[in-house]
Amino acid sequence: MSPHIDAATPHPFLGGTPKRLLIGGQWRPAASGRTFDTHNPASGARLAAVAEGDAADVDAAVQAARAAFEGPWSRFKPDERQALLLRLADVVEAHHDELAWLDTLDMGAPLRHTRGSRRHLVGLLRWFAGQATALYGQTAQTSLNGDMFAATLKEPVGVVGSIIPWNGPLWATVFKVAPVLATGCTLVLKPSEEAPLAPLRFAELALQAGVPEGVINVVTGFGRGAGAALAAHAGVDKVSFTGSVATGQAIVRASAGNLKRLSLELGGKSPHILFDDADIAAAARAAAMGVFANAGQICSAGTRVYVQRRIHDAVVDAMAEVARSLHVGDGLDPVTDIGPLVSGPQMQKVLDYMAGARDERARLVAGGERLTGPAHRHGHFVAPTVFADVHDPMRIAREEIFGPVAAVMPFDDLDEVVRRANASPYGLGAGVWTRDVGRAHAIARRLQAGSVWVNCYNQMDPSMPFGGVKLSGYGRESGLQHLDEYLHVKGLWIQAT
C-alpha cells in the first residue's frame, strides 16, 4: 500500500541519489552525467535532482523499446496484456495518494484535487484492459472474380515516443501508457522538466506490476535535448505529444524524416457560452471554474466567456464573487482551492497578459495581481482574475494565457456568438449553457471544437474521445478512437487455389 503521506515527512522517493532514467528495465544516470533540479512552485524548495537525458539516452531508450517490441512483448496474447493492465491499475490504485502527492509537490495543484483523480485514472487503465481483448479487424466481400477471402488486421504501430506537459503529469502519463500496453506497442516517455517526479514513480510501479523490461522507458530532460531527439529519431514509429502549438509544429517538421505517425493535443482558447435562459448561479460558477481550475493551466480552459447581454452584468458579478472566494495557497494545505503557477517564467507571462489587458482598456473586476503575503512570498501565486469590457481583438481574448484569467464578453444572438466563437485558430473545447434542448443541439453541431459540453464543463470519461481541431491538434485520447492511434490496418488477401 501507499506509505503515509504528510507535508512534514520526506518521502523516500525524494531522498538519496538523483532520479535516474529508465532504459530497458534498468535505472541509469544520463550518459552525460548531467542533472537538473526540480522545485516546489509553492515554496521554491528543491525537491530532487533528476538525470538530464539527451540524444544519446534517447537512442538507448529507443533501442531498448525496439528490442522489447520485437522480442518477448510481441508474444504476449491479448488476455496477457489485459491481465497486466489490470495489475497495473491495482498497483496505481494502492499508491494513488503517493502519486497525487508527488504531482502536487512538483506542479502545485491542490492535493485534494490530485487525489480526486483516482477513480478516473484507475478506471482508464481498467477500461483499456477491457479493450486489449477487443481489437477486431473486418472481413470484406470484394467484387473480384473467383473465390477471394479479404480481411483487415489491426497491428501495433511499434515504438511510440510520448512527450507530456507539466500541467497534469500523472494524467498525461496514464493517457500515454494505457493504449501502448493495450495494443502491444512499446514506449519511450519524455516527461516535462518542470514536473518529472510522478511519471518516474509511475514507471517504478509499472515494473512492480510486471511490465516487461523495455516496454516502458523514461528519459527525463529538456525539450531542446531529449524531446527534440525523440521527435526526430528514425527508430520511433509514432509520436504522441501534449503541449504547446509551437512545439507541436516543430514535432511535425521533425517527423518528416521517417514519416512518423503523430497525434497532437495542443493549445486552446475555448469559448464558454452562457445564454440568458441558463441557471445564472450554476452557469457563472462553472464558467469561473472553467478558467480558474488548476490555476488556469488546462489546455481546454474556457477563458473566452461569452454571455448573452441580458444576464451579462449578473454573470460578471457572480464570477467575480467566485474569484474572490477561492483560497489560493500551497497545494498541500487542505483548504486550498487554487495552487501556484508552475514556475516564475509562467507567472510572469500571466502577469504580462494582465498588464496588457489593462493597457487595452479591459475592465478589471477581480484579481489581477501577484499574491505576495506571508503565505505566498516564496511561490508563484496569482489571484483568480476576471476582466470585463473585453473585445475579441484583445490579446487576452485571442491568445492562450495558461493562467487564471477570464475574459468576459457580451453577445446578442446565436448566429453572432457562433461566428465569434469559431473565429479562433484553436478548436479544443467549448461550453454551452441553455435550457433550450433544440438550441443546444444546433449550436453544438456548429461549434468548431473537439468537445462540446452542454450545461457542464471539462467532463472526461474513458469511453469518450478528447482532442482538438485546427491549431489545437489532431488525433484523440481516450475512447475507442484512442486505440486506433496506436494501430496499423493491414489488408489481407487470400485467393483460394
Image (cartoon, rainbow, N blue to C red):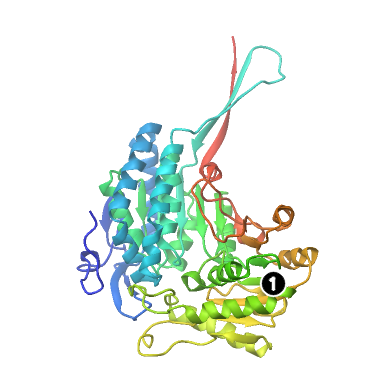
41 to 265, vertically: above or below: below
Residue 72 is left or right of residue 228, and the answer is left
Q: Residue furthest top?
A: 497
For the point 52% across and 40% down, the residue is 487
Between 133 and 199, the residue placed more toward the observer is 133
Report if residue 464 is visible in the image. yes
Q: Position of residue 286 (x, y in %)?
A: 56, 67
Between 134 and 27, the residue placed more toward the observer is 134
86 to 19, vertically: above or below: above
Q: Position of residue 249 (x, y in %)?
A: 59, 62
For the point 69% across and 76% down, the residue is 312
Disc 1: which residue: 307
Secondary structure of the residue carrying numbered label 1 = strand
Q: Position of residue 41 (x, y in %)?
A: 38, 77
356 to 56, vertically: above or below: below
What amino acid is labelled 1 in the image? Answer: Val
Q: Which quadrant would the C terminus be assigned to in this image?
A: top right
Residue 139 is left or right of residue 8, and the answer is right
For the point 34% across and 81% down, the residue is 44
